[in-house]
Image (spheres, grey):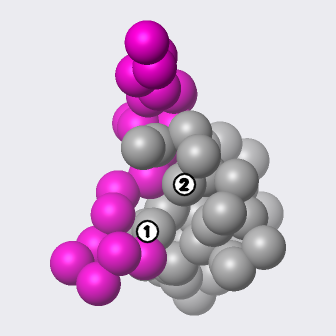
Amino acid sequence: MARKMKTHRGSAKRFKRTASGKLRRYKAYKSHGTGKKPAKSIRNLRKGTLVSKGDQKRINSMIP
């Protein structure tokens, strides 16, 4: 009898799948220590971005 794969809950909270099947993530380095960073770089950290192709295969296995 085949076992169902369990979803890695930490990954499920950090990544969302787009309609085309790609994975979306939030950028790091924004939680604290932003006092010395320019406002432009902090603004750019707000935007989400797509997961790179090298990481996508590994994350797909964690989020079946």
The quadrant of the picture occupied by the C terminus is top left
Q: Residue at x 44, y 52 (%)?
A: 15
> Which amino acid is tagged 1?
Arg
Tell me which segment is drawn in magenta. 1-22
Q: Is residue 53 left or right of residue 23?
A: right
What element does badge 2 sit on?
Answer: helix
The one of 21 and 45 positioned closer to us in this rendering: 21
The one of 30 and 10 positioned closer to us in this rendering: 10
What element does badge 1 sit on?
Answer: strand
Asked whether residue 48 is in view, the answer is: no
Q: Residue at x 65, y 42 (%)?
A: 32
Q: Is residue 61 left or right of residue 4?
A: right
Asked whether residue 43 is in view, the answer is: yes
Q: Is residue 37 magenta?
A: no
Tell me residue 28's x, y (percent). 66, 56
Disc 2 target residue: 60
Q: Which mark is residue 62?
A: none
Disc 1 target residue: 24
Residue extending farthest left: 19
Badge nearest the viewer, 1 or 2: 2
> Which amino acid is tagged 2?
Asn
Q: Is residue 9 magenta?
A: yes
Q: Compare marks 1 and 2 and give the one earlier in the sequence.
A: 1
Tell me residue 5's x, y (percent). 47, 26
Q: Residue at x 35, y 75 (%)?
A: 21
Dominant secondary structure of the residues highlighted in magenta in the image: loop
Q: Residue at x 21, y 78 (%)?
A: 19
